Image: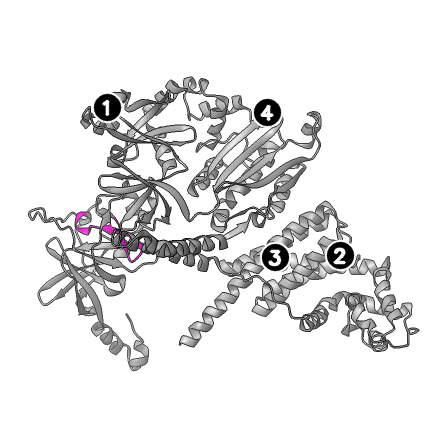
Amino acid sequence: MHMNLQETVPTKQPVSAEAAKHSRTQLIVFKLGKEEYGLAIDQIKEVVLTPNITRMPQTAPYIKGVANIRGNIIAILDLEEKFGISDKTIDSPVVGKYTLVVASEEYKIGILVKEVPNTLSVSKADIDETVSIVHDDKQDSNYIKGIVKVNNRLIILIDIYQIMNKQELAQSLGK
Amino acid sequence: MKDKSQMDSKELEYKELFLAEALENHEELNRLMTELEKNSSNKNAINALFRITHTLKGNASGMGFEDITKLSHTLEDLFNEIRSGKLQVDATIFNDLFKAIDTLGALINSLKTGQPVRYQGIKAKLEVIIRKATENNEVISPIAPIEQPIKTKARSGKNTLVTKATDSPSTLAPVHVQERVAPLTATTGATTATIEPGVEQKILPQESTIGNQETEKPDTEKVDAQITFSDLVQVPVKKLDNLLNLVSELTIERDRLVAMHMGKLSKNEYSRLQRISSDLQYSVMDVRLVQVGFLFNKFHRVLRDAAASENKKVSLKLEGTDTEIDRNILQIISDSLIHLIRNSVGHGIETPAERLNAGKAETGTVTLRASTDKDSVIIEIQDDGKGIDHTIIRKKAIEKGLISKEAASQLSEMDCIMYIFEPGFSSVDQVTSISGRGVGMDVVKKAIDAVGGNISLFTKVGQGTVIKLSLPSSMAVKGTLLFELDRTEYAIPLTYTEAVGCLYKKDIHKVGNGLVATHLGKTISIVFLKDLFALNDYSHHSREGVFHTSFDRVSPDEKLSIIIVSYHNRRVGLVVDKLLQQKEIIEKPLAKPVDVVKFISGVTILGNGNICLVLNITAMISYIFRISNTATQLQSLSA
């Protein structure tokens, strides 16, 4: 989001860099497992109550099935299961009461969340994109874009489009 | 901002319209060229070629597509030379002309892809041909073609025109005088004597260079005089797709409402709504139908190229070109048809020498035939070539490891020939440019399967081969059988269902890794659908006896519902939880990321808003029989 910096602050470069630091970005924040996760707001189309899910054969376990959301056929994903962070101590019958519908022409996916997600405006400066995460050959961690630290909260910023990249899906289908 | 975007979308729409028309023009050019090649004195074809290049040029320049304008202009010039008889059509010209038309096609396509296309070379080549023609003409027969129009004109005796021709021949091209003779005669003048051979010769060299730019003038005059509106409207397919989607949703919504008020109101309350909405649905489907001739006409060129590169003589015969089929289906199968036609030329039709030896006509015939059969459209590709020898196929299938020797020896001739549709089968020893590229009939079969069609083949050694494609005429509506499994509803297209019935545990027997039962005296494989869907790893049957899991749990007095599905003469009885009703459904394709699921071809939304999965029987049967060892054993058992 480098919005027209040249126009608004035409003076010197350091100033525009300063402005970039202060530019803010909106996140959708939701809980997965015991941690808070965030997505750029423009990656989410809407939040709906999870409709009836029809299970789909030949898919990875974290793809819960497909659902009809306003006439669109949306694949419903359980990211807790995908990330391997399901809280198994709580035996909740509700997998995810709400579904975040991802804004994408190509992929029709929804993400299950247990609680109503919040929006959060953070300064770009609060996003640490240089985090190095313990690398695991099995779990591709490309989708983690950074860590946001605000008011003693730690939010893991993810890129849903990365999660959906083809290769990974092909693997998940066991081909 | 809004205005701008509106303008952009208008612009885009014009571009789409231009593209649609240009592609049509290009295809027509190809067809006419092949016709002209067959009979180089075909006046109609020449005239049409000239007319089409002219239209294309006009349209392109209107849109500001410089490259297309320039190349089609040159082509137009050239056809004009041919038309006026100054340029003789011979084999050498044809190669350049075909190349030029290909380049033109590439230019048109590049509007979509944005890829740069080089056309200057071929354009220059054409210009050389034109120049040569006009020069030769001057020396050998200077005035023959031009004499006539001038004379007619002279007879009509229009004063101004004659003077014009003498003073500045550039303002009016003599060629067009011919066309304009009729209106000109209306005004009669006097002087005719001024026309002399000298004048005519003066006109001649000029005419070839400027003739075509001048064409526009008289043409626009003609159009102005009488504006005609076409009875047809061109609509981008995307809009039709959208319309169909909306209608589908309307139908679903209708079913939902009807289901909701079931019992509260009498059924008649909805009968009108039912009728109107289903009429609407069929009307929209009808709009999407196009005549197969639309596609068939493209194959003149395909066949010509294939025959030329194989040094074979083949003619194409089209039948039933007015048969109608859904446009999207036609698009999906078009590549397959190209492949099949190339195959017919490459593998089917013999060389002229071989044909003569066999007592056949030197020129082979490939026939493309379309017809309607109930709800499906039948497309047949027939050749009068050498046919397919099942012994060769048998040998090949064993060599490629597609089947064991023992199993192969028990296959019937027909079953054996069907192996050409297996992946990895290619019967030509040498790879030629036309066919035998390794990918082959299996790709064709997949495409046909994808639209819910069927492929079959009839062949007789020495007499030829017929490949028969049976396709649904519309993709939208499918007759299906609904059933329940694990409290989820599924649908099976009726095309694949053979029978339904019920069995008890005692009727089913374990054979190898699978299960079998007897149906109408025949042994069929039985698969509990639950087991198939429960597999985690589809690459191989990981555990022994996976297909026995549910069977082992069934109690002896439980009635098992079976749906017998068949594909490719392979029959499987699927065990499901509960049979539901038959229903016409509108199938929606799967979007990413679940589009890779093989067993499900699409979904439909039921009246209650739930999603119902549509089974892809072809994929399931292929899977069951391909990998399971049981299948091979079974096949040899039942064969």
Question: Which element type, helix, strand or loop, lies under badge 2?
Answer: helix
Distance between the alpha carbons at the discs numbered 2 and 4: 45 Å
Residue B153 counted in the magenta span: no
Q: Nearer the viewer, residue B553 or B197?
A: B553
Report the amino acid beneath label 3: Asn
Of residues B335 and B262, which is closer to you in this image? B262
State how far apart marks 2 and 1 are (Cα).
80 Å
- The residue that mark 3 highlights is B25
Q: Are marks 3 and 2 on the same chain?
A: yes
Both labels 4 and 3 in a single chain: yes
Quarter of the image for the N terminus of chain B: give it: bottom left
Name the residue type under label 4. Val
Residues packed near mark 2 inside 10 Å, few (<14), some (14 to 19) or many (20 plus) = many
Residue B406 in the image, given as x and y percentages of width and height? 41, 17
Residue B485, above or below B9? above
The residue at the far left in this view is: A89
Would residue A135 be visible to someone looking at this image? no
Can residue B502 be seen here? The reply is yes
- Give the Cα separation between the discs numbered 3 and 2: 19 Å
Q: Earlier in the sequence, mark 2 or mark 4?
A: 2
The residue where tag 4 is placed is: B461
Give a yes or no on whether discs 2 and 4 share a subunit: yes
Tell me the chief SS of the magenta region. strand
Magenta extent? A66-81
